Amino acid sequence: MRIEKNKLQEHNRSLLAEHERRYEFFASGIKNAESILQKLIDFQVAIPSWALGTGGTRFGRFPSGGEPRNLEEKIEDVGLLHSLNRSSGAISLHIPWDIPKNAAEIKTLAAQYDLRFDAMNSNTFQDQPGQPLTYKFGSMQHVDKSVRKQAVEHNIEVIKHGIDLGSTSLTVWLSDGSCFPGQLNFRKAFQNTLESLKEVYAALPADWKMFVEYKAYEPNFYSTTVGDWGQSLLYASKLGSKAFTLVDLGHHLPNANIEQIVALLLMEGKLGGFHFNDSKYGDDDLTVGSIKPYQLFLIFNELVDGMDARAMNHATDLGWMIDASHNVKDPLEDLLQSVEAIMISYAQALLVDRKKLIDAQQDNDVVTAQEILQNAFRTDTRTLVAEARLRAGGALDPLAIFRKEKVRQALIKDRGTKTVATGL
Ligand SMILES: [Mn+2]
């Protein structure tokens, strides 16, 4: 489904006078509004194909209908989001859930929605129908070389699908680990995993990146073979210059200082990609910015600082992705909220007076340093983000138009109430 251009214009017209009043006031109070606006316009966050349906827990799933039934409909949904916020111009696919029947046609379809393919994701955390060997006791870490070989071959197949679609990165998240002490020899598990990753790495095209994602626990509850950023960095360093660490916000132990992790990975040139979400207790996969918005801002503050220190392009040098799940919300509304939260935090981070901050740090002026960060965080950047969206051709209020145009009802009418997004 698409929202007609004239509906979008009508929506924007109805909010324009109020928006302009607010934006002019805001822009008059900051020095570099135009350059910040351009950065916001350029910044794109990839939508994962698995977040377009209703998520669930092991206790149940309560879908509300109209979910995409195939890859074409997933692309259509991301295209709709992108037409509203102009910041969701990429999709991250999951193999085998999203194997294209005809890659050329899928690529053309995506281009019609102004979408590109971000990182490809492999899956060795589940057994697929007809798969000869089980991943019950791990994949790349497995004691049996033939299981490791199967996992390696799957990842190479994912790279091939990605090449056909024009993607240039592979995210490897392994659920490998152990549930009980004694189950696993940690060193052997690491070495087997490294050996397997090396074989996948060898199959990467020259312009590709490999992202090694870590996670503290779940589904394994005693040890995880890529359990934290140190372990991920170890693998990425041993693999080579095309391998990087991927940070998923929900994959840390409680209270981990993620902004410090980000700062050091960037310093080492080893931060490759990001999975945004939010959490209260564990890997909750909640809407970005819904629980700890200050943490999100502090992370963006380090991202901007660290990328600028290395003269990196904010929009293109790291892989920006959402990795969330929606149990009680409309998935598309949730994604609009998540992208908005990311843009708000990024805009706040761009407002930080870096020169003043460095001076305060140099003078051990703790109070001023804190004030600088909190002033930026307490600045309402919604108007700035809306102006960027407007200039890029999007909607002033994406959620409002989504509801007014009854998008979900139309999707239910078109796709039915009982649809289940592939992969969930
Ligand atoms: Mn993730």
Image: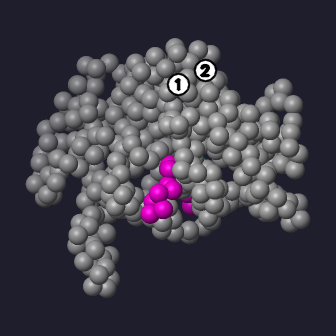
Q: What residue type is labelled 2?
A: Pro
Say which quarter of the image contains residue 180: bottom right
Q: What residue type is labelled 1?
A: Leu
Classify mark 2: helix, strand or loop. Answer: loop
> In the current view of this chain or complex, which residue is farthest to the bottom?
364
Say which quarter of the image contains residue 303: bottom left
Instruction: Identify the residue position indicated by label 1 in the image.
Output: 165
Can residue 347 be seen by looking at this rendering?
A: yes
Which of these two is toward me, 131 or 204?
A: 204
Q: In this view, does 23 lie to the left or right of 408?
A: left
Classify mark 1: helix, strand or loop. Answer: helix
Instruction: Identify the residue position indicated by label 2 in the image.
Output: 100
Measure the alpha-carbon separation of dots 1 and 2.
9 Å
Q: Residues within 10 Å of mark 2 (few under 14, many from 20)?
A: some
x, y percent for residue 399: 37, 37
Q: In this view, does 312 lie to the left or right of 232?
A: left
The quarter of the picture where the C terminus appears is top right
Considering only vertical position in the picture, is 368 above or below 344? below
Q: Which segment did they paint magenta?
A: 266-281
Q: Which of marks 1 and 2 is nearer the N terminus?
A: 2
Mark 1 and mark 2 residues within 8 Å of each other at the beta carbon:
yes
